[in-house]
Structures are given as C-alpha cells and as structure tokens.
C-alpha cells in the first residue's frame, strides 16, 4: 500500500477499476468472460433500481473491468458510444482519502467532474470524487477502506452459471493514452504538476519509427510506481500512424490500450488464442537474431516464435510482451499481455518490428 509523505501529495494504492462505455454491456461482459477469462463479480441495472444504464463488473486477479451501457437514447453514455464506439471512460484510482485527492488535484489545476460524495449500503460506505483528463477520459478517486461489499454501493453480486476459467492475468501494468498533435507535453505537465507523477521514460520519433510512420511517447508514473501512464502523440511520417488512425476513429484523444501482467505469458497467450483472441504477428525474421539481441532467457525460443511473443532487455532484466488486435470494429482499443522478468522498461527494442506489423494491419484496413 502507498504511504503518504511530504512529497507525495496524491498517494495511490493502485488501479481500482477501468470502466468501458459500450453499446451492449451484457454481450461485452460475456466476451470478456469467454475470451479473456474474467470472472463475474457484480451487477447494477433495472433490477437494482437503475433506470438509465446497466453495468456488469468482472474481475481477474487484481484487474477489475466495468462494462456500462445506456438504456436511453441521447444519454451521455449513449452519446459517448455514438461518438467514440466502445472505449474506456473511467480509469479509477484506489486511494485512502478521496476528498483530499480531489482537493489536492483541483487546487493544482485539475477540472473537477465529480465533487467528493459518499455512497452507502449495508456493507459500509465508499467516498469517491473525479477529475477530467485527456479527451473525455476521467480519473475517479475511490476510497473504500470502510466498505466490505462486492464492488460499490448500488451493485449486487453477479453469480451466473457460466464461469470460464481464468487465463492467468494478474494486474494492470500500465494504461496508454493517445493524444493529438502537439498535446503530449500538455498532458505530461498535467500528470507531473496536478498528480505529482514523474517522467519515467521518453521516446521520440527516432526511437519509435519505421520507414512510413512515427510517434512520440513519454511514460508518467506515480511515485510508488503502482500507476504508469504512457502518453503517445503522432509524429510526422510518410503515412498515417497508428496514433492518427486511433484519433480519427475514436474521434479524439483516449485510452489506447491496457497492458495486463501475467506470470506465464506462454500459457496465458496460448489460452487466449484458444478462446479466440487475435494477436498482432511480427515477421518471422524478428526471431532470427532474437537471442543475440536479448541474451539468455529462461524460456525456449520455439514457443516464443510460435506465439509471436516479443522479448526485450534493459539493465534490470527482460520482458516478454504481445499485443492483441483491436477488440471492437473500430481500430481503437486493444490489449497488451506482458510478463516482466526484472525489466522496468516498455520494450523499446521491439518498437520497429511491432509497428511494422501494425502497419500491415492498417494496410488491410486501408487506413495507412
């Protein structure tokens, strides 16, 4: 758990939940159970007294996803889905004091989206508050130290018969945000000044480029490293980059992907593939010199090559990672599966091969 100190004015204990606004929450919840192994946890909707929306809550390890749909045309949720398609609306942060978190961030320049409020039921109380971030994405601060319920007040336990097994996903490693031209520094400054984050790593268009496309990225992290938010911005290239494609189809800035950690990426990816999750594939030539680039690793090369898993090393160790294709019709939100074997970086050595594989997909979509 995070500890408060003189320099950490916003202690954060971790990611509380990630809420997606989707066109059909019931079907989205089923997909994430079947494809990714999330377990049913809680529900709120007509049966619990809600008249405007329905929410399904799923959990795997420490990862909690909420899928929310509107029951009414023209509501803010419906308009969000109309504009953006299915996407991440709320990145909720688990804190010890939601009132203080709101006060400290707002006085440093954050725009409030939710004044501190308390919700109660027979299991106790939850205090929450919220601020605006890039695009229409929100950060909600959740204080749940006095709550023993299944999720939040207003939700009931969701206990269906259908319960596919877990896929071995453990926790949120990082969440990447895509912003528009010239906006990266604005949001880097926001996370530094408003939330007290530090810049962990910076990549420019020389680090992240191919013959055709480029982008720039800076990784912002909380002082305890529990929260890591890379911020991406397009860079000039011969053709349309993946960031430009995202912003075009998402109609603005938003959360591009969630990286989820596993202790055994080979088992997890094999399971996800068997359930129908599709992953990007780098050229086979990537593996011809892999061992020369990264040195000795614990895993055998054959299954790494078979599954298309990427490997990179830094001064602290190495990591294994792979990226899904977009999980909705618009080429926007996708997922990363990552296993860290000591490495604290983000796979810089894989960028060129990864982006070339993304460009191949863009070419198929006619959006490159």
Image (spheres, rainbow, N blue to C red):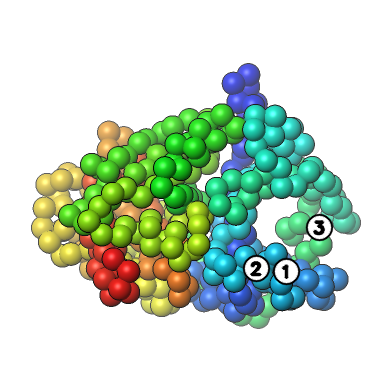
Count residues near mark 1 (Cα–Cα under 10 Å), then give few for <14, some for 14-19, many for 20+. Answer: few
What number is the disc on residue 79?
Answer: 2
What number is the disc on residue 153?
Answer: 3
Of residues 218 and 258, the one nearer the viewer is 218
Q: Which residue is mark 1?
A: 75
Place of residue 216 in the rendered image (x, y in percent of width and height, measured from the top left): 34, 44
Res 340 visible: no
Above or below 250: residue 237 = above
In 3D space, how far apart are the residues under numbered discs 2 and 1 (Cα atoms)?
6 Å
Q: Residue 110 appears in which quarter of the rendering? A: top right
Q: Secondary structure at mark 3?
A: loop
Q: Residue 146 appears in which quarter of the rendering? A: top right
Report the side of 204 relative to 78 (left or right).
Answer: left
Count residues near mark 3 (Cα–Cα under 10 Å), then give few for <14, some for 14-19, many for 20+. Answer: some
Of residues 54 and 155, the one nearer the viewer is 54
Q: Residue at x 73, y 32 (%)?
A: 103
Of residues 6 and 102, the one nearer the viewer is 102
Q: Residue at x 15, y 65 (%)?
A: 284
Quadrant housing the N terminus: top right
Q: Secondary structure at mark 1?
A: loop
Quadrant housing the C terminus: bottom left
Q: Are marks 3 and 1 in contact (CB under 8 Å)?
A: no
In 3D space, how far apart are the residues under numbered discs 3 and 1 (Cα atoms)?
22 Å
Res 305 visible: yes
Q: Residue 11 appears in which quarter of the rendering? A: top right
- Residue ranking furthest to the top: 6
């Amino acid at each position: 758990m995070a500890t408060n100190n003189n320099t950490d004015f916003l202690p954060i204990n971790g990611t509380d939940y990630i809420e997606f606004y989707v066109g059909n929450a019931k079907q989205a919840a089923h997909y994430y159970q079947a494809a990714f192994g999330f377990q049913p946890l809680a529900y709120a909707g007509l049966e619990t007294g809600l008249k405007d929306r329905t929410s399904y809550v799923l959990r795997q390890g420490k990862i909690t996803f909420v899928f929310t749909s509107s029951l009414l045309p023209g509501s803010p949720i419906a308009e969000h889905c109309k504009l953006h398609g299915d996407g991440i609306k709320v990145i909720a942060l688990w804190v010890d004091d939601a009132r203080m978190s709101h006060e400290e961030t707002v006085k440093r320049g954050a725009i409030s989206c939710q004044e501190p409020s308390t919700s109660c039921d027979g299991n106790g109380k939850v205090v929450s508050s919220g601020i605006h971030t890039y695009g229409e994405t929100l950060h909600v601060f959740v204080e749940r130290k006095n709550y023993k319920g299944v999720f939040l007040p207003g939700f009931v336990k969701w206990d269906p018969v259908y319960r596919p097994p877990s896929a071995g996903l453990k926790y949120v490693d990082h969440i990447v945000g895509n912003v528009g031209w010239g906006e990266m520094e604005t949001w880097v400054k926001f996370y530094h000044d408003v939330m007290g984050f530090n810049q962990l790593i910076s990549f420019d268009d020389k680090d992240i480029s191919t013959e055709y496309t480029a982008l720039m990225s800076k990784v912002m992290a909380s002082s305890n490293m529990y929260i890591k938010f890379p911020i991406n911005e397009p860079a000039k290239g011969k053709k349309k980059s993946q960031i430009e494609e995202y912003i075009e189809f998402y109609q603005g800035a938003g959360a591009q992907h969630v990286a989820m950690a596993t202790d055994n990426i080979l088992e997890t990816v094999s399971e996800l593939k068997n359930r129908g999750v599709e992953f990007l594939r780098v050229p086979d030539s990537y593996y011809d010199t892999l061992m020369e680039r990264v040195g000795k690793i614990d895993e055998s090369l054959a299954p790494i090559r078979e599954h298309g898993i990427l490997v990179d090393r830094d001064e602290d160790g190495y990591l294994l990672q792979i990226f899904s294709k977009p999980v909705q019709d618009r080429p926007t939100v996708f997922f990363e599966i990552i296993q860290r074997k000591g490495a604290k970086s983000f796979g810089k050595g894989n960028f060129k091969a990864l982006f070339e594989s993304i460009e191949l997909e863009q070419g198929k979509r006619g959006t490159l």
